Amino acid sequence: MSFISVGQDAKGQDINLHYVDLGQGPTVVLIHGWPLSYESWEYQLNELPKNGVRVVAYTRRGFGHSDKPWNGYDYDTLSDDLKAVLEGLDLQDVTLVGFSMGGGEVARYMSRHQGARVSRVAFVSAVTPYLLKTDDNPDGVDKSTFDDMVDGLKKDRPDFLTTFGKQFYGDGLLSNPVSQATLDWSQSLALQGAPYASEQCARAFSETDFRQDLQTIKVPVLSIHGEDDKTVPYKNSAKRLDQYLSHATQIVYDGAPHGLLVTDKEKLSQDLLTFAHGSESFDRTDSEQDQY
């Protein structure tokens, strides 16, 4: 396994992140969602390098085989970890792809580090622009929803993640539902995360405001979201991007849930390939694509 150091913890010990680097061509960096690891990109890691793309994916601190320090699960620190990965591997002209929680890392990196080394940005089922309902964000989600998530993690984490995983992939209501084996595989990835990292990251992605971060992004942007996403509802997230990213291209997958990287893996991979190769022209019906 390959690891890259992204700094040190409060005790002066190195923090190493597990990563993979596959293929040759334009570079795509995949950032996974909560509460999984880079292995959740399994199909894309197998498919994209076959089509002239270099793919780098890493597991954020606290999850998978990466180190699990007690602290550092805020988005400033996580975006600094991303910076360390890009610099450590000397990646240039990167297409950053953030899935779910990973979309927040993309947004924060682009503002905090001025988009260094990045030429294109893609948000997939992302938590941006701001999930939490507040006085100045009335279209957000009630805080009680996220409180219940953290309470569920504390009470019985394996049971909570089992229920969460079913919703993640559509709860069996899809025309092509995922198999029980896939749910078991996803659960195994989620359980590799440290409990404290899972709780802190749940607070981070639900309570962090990315609205100003998004407004700093000047490179081409692609947003892909499932119309029937119950985990990060489209109406509370991607539908609102036009307020902050007037130049973004958005694709909405009809009837799709949150876990597009599995349920719509062929379509998602093709769209990411098209974007990574420098095109913003997608073969979609009017119901699936909007040009913001």
Image (cartoon, rainbow, N blue to C red):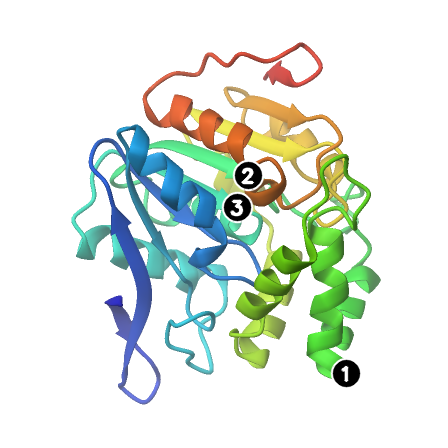
Q: Is residue 259 above or below residue 193?
A: above
Q: Residue 145, position in %: x, y?
A: 81, 60
Answer with left or right where residue 227 lies relative to residue 8. Answer: right
Q: Is residue 97 above or below residue 286?
A: below
Q: Looking at the image, which is closer to me, 45 or 141? A: 45
Residue type at tag 1: Lys
Secondary structure beneath dot 1 equals helix
Q: Is residue 143 above or below residue 129?
A: below
Q: Is residue 167 above or below residue 236?
A: below
Residue underneath mark 3: 99
Residue type at tag 3: Phe
Q: Looking at the image, which is closer to me, 187 or 99? A: 187
Answer with left or right where residue 130 lies relative to residue 156. Answer: left
Check the picture and name the quadrant holding the N terminus.
Answer: bottom left
Q: Looking at the image, which is closer to me, 87 or 157? A: 157
Q: Residues within 10 Å of mark 2 (few under 14, many from 20)?
A: many
Q: Spatial distance from mark 2 to mark 1, Cα to Cα?
A: 30 Å
Q: Residue 281, position in %: x, y?
A: 46, 12
Secondary structure beneath dot 3 equals strand
Q: Residues within 10 Å of mark 3 (few under 14, many from 20)?
A: many
Q: Residue 235, position in %: x, y?
A: 76, 35
Residue underneath mark 1: 155
Callout 2–callout 3 Cβ contact below 8 Å:
yes
At a point 33% along the width and 19% down the height, the residue shown is 278
At a point 37% along the width and 76% down the height, the residue shown is 67
Residue underneath mark 2: 124
Q: Spatial distance from mark 2 to mark 3, Cα to Cα?
A: 5 Å
Kindly tell me whether residue 144 is visible in this rendering: yes
Kindly tell me whether residue 105 is visible in this rendering: no
Q: Residue furthest bottom?
A: 11
